[in-house]
Each structure stands twice: as structure tokens, then as C-alpha cells.
Image (spheres, helix red, strand yellow):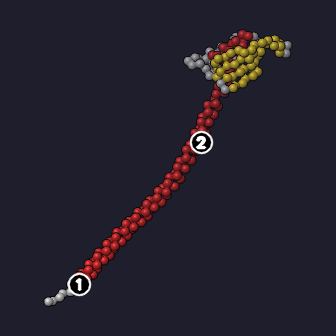
Amino acid sequence: MIKINLLLVRETRQKESVKQQFSILLLFLAITVVIMGGIQWFMVSSINFTKGSITRAEGEISQLKAKIGQIDNIKKLQAEVRKKLDVLKQLRADKSGPVKRLAALSDAVPDKVWLTRYAEAGDGISISGTAFSEALIADFMRNLEASRQFHQVELLVSEQVDLSGVKVKRFDLTCKLGARRNEEPKIQRPPT
């Protein structure tokens, strides 16, 4: 009988099977390394792109901060200019106000009435003076009320004093700046 040695075939098959499994393992490892390398390359390029985006965004932020600083400076300058314009507007308004008030006061003073003091505090005015009679003081007060520059004229003090041997009436009165609306000035001069 013939004997066939099958052990050799089995060993050969086993060796081939091991070689095949080893080559599959090497192929799997190679594919895994390629995939991992691709993932690594993708992640690194993603990180680099994100870093570039962050750098660009920070540059834009610094430019915007500079523009915001310029805008803030412009707003401060605008506020300063507005304040200066308001001051100029107020100065222009105040420039003609005292002249008109003093002209109206001069028109309101009857003959034989002398003013000794005129003081403004806010919208209040206090006036002191002397006159020959109480009627002249009353005419003065009516003339002030009739002008467009003064209103709420009130007599505080009226007393007789001796001025260089002549008996005169000394008076103190107060009034407010501005006039009542819709009234025409009616300044009266007493006959002399």
C-alpha cells in the first residue's frame, strides 16, 4: 500500500493560510495607517484654517476697535461743538437782552424819579431809587408793568427820607424778567 504523507500538505496549507492572514493583516494595517494619516492631515489642515480665521477675525476686531475709537472721538468733538454752539447762541441772545431791558427801563422812568440801584439775579430784578412823590413811584411801576421786558412789579419799601434838606421818597421794588403775552406796551409819561 501506498502511503501518502498529508502532513506536509497540511503544513503547507497552514503556512499559506498564515501568510495569507499576515498579508491581510499587513493590508489592513496599511489601510488603517493611510486612513489615520488622512484623518490627521484633515485635522491639521482644519486647525490651520481655523487659526487663520481666528487671526483674520482678530485683525478685523483690532481695525473695528480703531474705528470705534475714532467714532468715539468724533462723538466727543460733536458734543464739544454743540456745547460751544449753545454757548454762542446763548451769548447772542444775551447780547441784545440787557440792552432791550435797560432801554425799556429808561423809557419807563418818569421825570423826577432817580434810580440808585439795579440788580438782576436769575429772572428776578431789584430796583432802588428816589422820587419826589408816591404818585411818581406808582407811575414808574405802571410803566414797568406796561413794558414787554418786566412783569410782576411789586413795591417792597416806600419811605420818606431827607436828601440834602429835601424830603423825597426812597423806594425798593422787585419784578420779573419777560412780559405777559398778548399785551401792547403802554408807557405813560406824567405831565411836567
**Discs 1/2, front:** 1
Q: What is the number of the mark on residue 7? A: 1
**Which of the 4 image quadrants contains residue 143?**
top right
Q: What is the number of the mark on residue 148? A: none
Identify whether 29 is placed above or below 64: below
Element type where label 2 sits in the image: helix
Percent position of residue 165, x then y: 85, 13
Identify whether 22 is placed above or below 105: below
C-beta proximity under 8 Å, tags 1 and 2 = no
Of residue 1 and residue 165, the one placed in the foreground of this image is 1
Say if residue 104 shows up in the picture: no
Percent position of residue 70, x then y: 54, 50
> Mark 2 = which residue?
80
Element type where label 1 sits in the image: helix
Q: CA distance from mark 1 to mark 2?
A: 106 Å
Q: Specify whether 93 is left or right of 157.
A: left
Q: Residue at x 37, y 68 (%)?
A: 36
Q: Specify whether 19 is left or right of 137.
A: left
Amino acid bearing label 1: Leu
Percent position of residue 84, x then y: 61, 39
Q: Earlier in the sequence, mark 1 or mark 2?
A: 1
Of residue 8 and residue 76, the one placed in the foreground of this image is 8
Q: Residue furthest bottom?
A: 1
Of residue 32 and residue 110, the one placed in the foreground of this image is 32
Q: Residues within 10 Å of mark 2 (few under 14, many from 20)?
A: few
In the picture, the quarter occupied by the C terminus is top right
Say if residue 153 shows up in the picture: yes
In the picture, the quarter occupied by the N terminus is bottom left
Q: Residue furthest front?
A: 1
Q: Specify whether 123 is left or right of 47.
A: right
Q: Residue at x 36, y 71 (%)?
A: 33
- How many marks the image carries: the answer is 2
